Amino acid sequence: MIKFAFATATLAFSVSFALAQDKPAPPPMWQQGRPASLADSKLAPNPGKMTETQASEVPLDKLKLPKGFKVEVWAAGLVGGRAMAFSDSGKKIYVGTRGIGRVYEVTDAGDKRTVRVVVDKLNQPSGVAFQGGSLYVMAIDKVLRYDGIEDKPSGAPVDMTKAFDLPPEQHHNWKYLAFGPDKKLYVPFGGPCNICEPPTKEYAQLRRYNPDGTGKEVIATGIRNTQGFDWHPKTGEIWFTDHGRDWLGDNGPEDELNRISKPGLFFGFPYCHAKGIPDPDVAKGKKDACKDVTLPVTTMGPHAAVMGIKFYTGDMFPKEYQGVAFIARKGSWNRTKKFGYDVVTVKATADGKNPKITPFMTGFMDPKANSFWGRPAYISQLKDGSLLVSDEQLGVIYRISYGAPKK
């Protein structure tokens, strides 16, 4: 009897194991929302370059800028480098990553820059911010604060994860961080899908916290995936970029540039996209899907992957660039003909009227070959008025300066 029971249990285990083996693995997250008509599509996210690129290997001669502007490699060796945060002294810049799980420290010695790894093996620590002598690092599932890191480079971090109440889903949950004029830390939490009704209300929103994680406020909702925001130099209002959904074809819905004129606004996800396009999946049968939605200042192109935004406030560039928004478009994957892979300017009135998009830094992409070599991601401004642009694909930071052409 014991032998029979054992044989029966073994058979049941074998059958269940075989069934488990036969069950197909779930599709990757980036395929979610792909229609059956595109089941054979070869489109997929562009793989990052996970090895170091030397400054001498960067094809600077391919980059194009307006007359009088110059570009150079300011720092290299930052594999997967994305968002940048200046230390209080301005002598160090901290750089977050996604795929490789690192945060870097770049020390500026004037004539050269050195790079070291602050922390490794985190879960997509793209969010970095600096205030009051402390570096804040935010990954999918962890928040770390490095106090006095400029003077104590090997100091252990303070784990602040519990205070920030992080939601568990990973998709679109990598972060961009910034301290606002109010000294609060602003943090986005993207929609946990390509397109869906979020399972809980803690997604598709922009929050702000006190530096210690207390005082959580949700200041805007309906935000699919913002990877960059800045405060307008005249109004103090937040302007943010937002990625449109995938798998609705080559031409839309377009990415967005939005403006938060007051707390509590709803920006449409998942029901309404771009300048008032109801979602054909989630909003099906829903009347007035775009009612009460705050529409964008401007759309930024289909599948452009708009990232960092920086309002220019320096003295180096010509006067017509004062208050203009510089925006990095990392470039498309969910589009047959590649689009983006550049830095553009957006000039508009302080209340978001009459926006005009102008190419500024191009040459990362070859339209004829439908290929790219670089992916600009974030923009920062140095004290001298020059701009830094991170290239996530090559792991370098460019410096853009201006010198009036000689007569």
Image: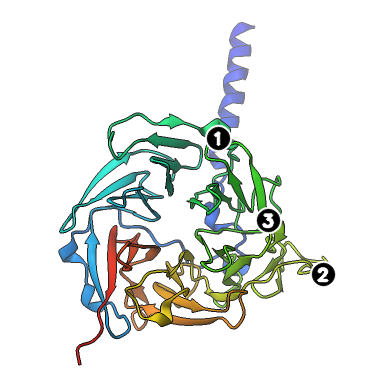
Residue at mark 2 = 288
Answer few, some or many: residues within 10 Å of disc 3's Cα (few below 14, many 20 plus, some between 14 and 19). Answer: many
Q: CA distance from mark 1 to mark 3?
A: 45 Å
**Which structural element holds mark 3?**
strand
Q: CA distance from mark 3 to mark 2?
A: 18 Å
The structure residue drawn at horizontal position 37% and vertical position 66%, both measured from the top left corner, is 376
| Colour mode of the rendering | rainbow
**Which structural element holds mark 1?**
helix
Asked if the residue under mark 1 is in contact with the one under mark 2, i.e. CB atoms within 8 Å, the reply is no
Query: Which of the image's four quarters has the N terminus?
Result: top right
Three-letter amino acid code of the residue under disc 2: Asp
Residue at mark 1 = 18
Residue at mark 3 = 221
Is residue 338 in view? no
Three-letter amino acid code of the residue under disc 3: Thr
Q: Position of residue 77 (x, y in %)?
A: 23, 53
Q: Nearer the viewer, mark 1 or mark 3?
A: 3
- Give the residue at the far top of this rendering: 1
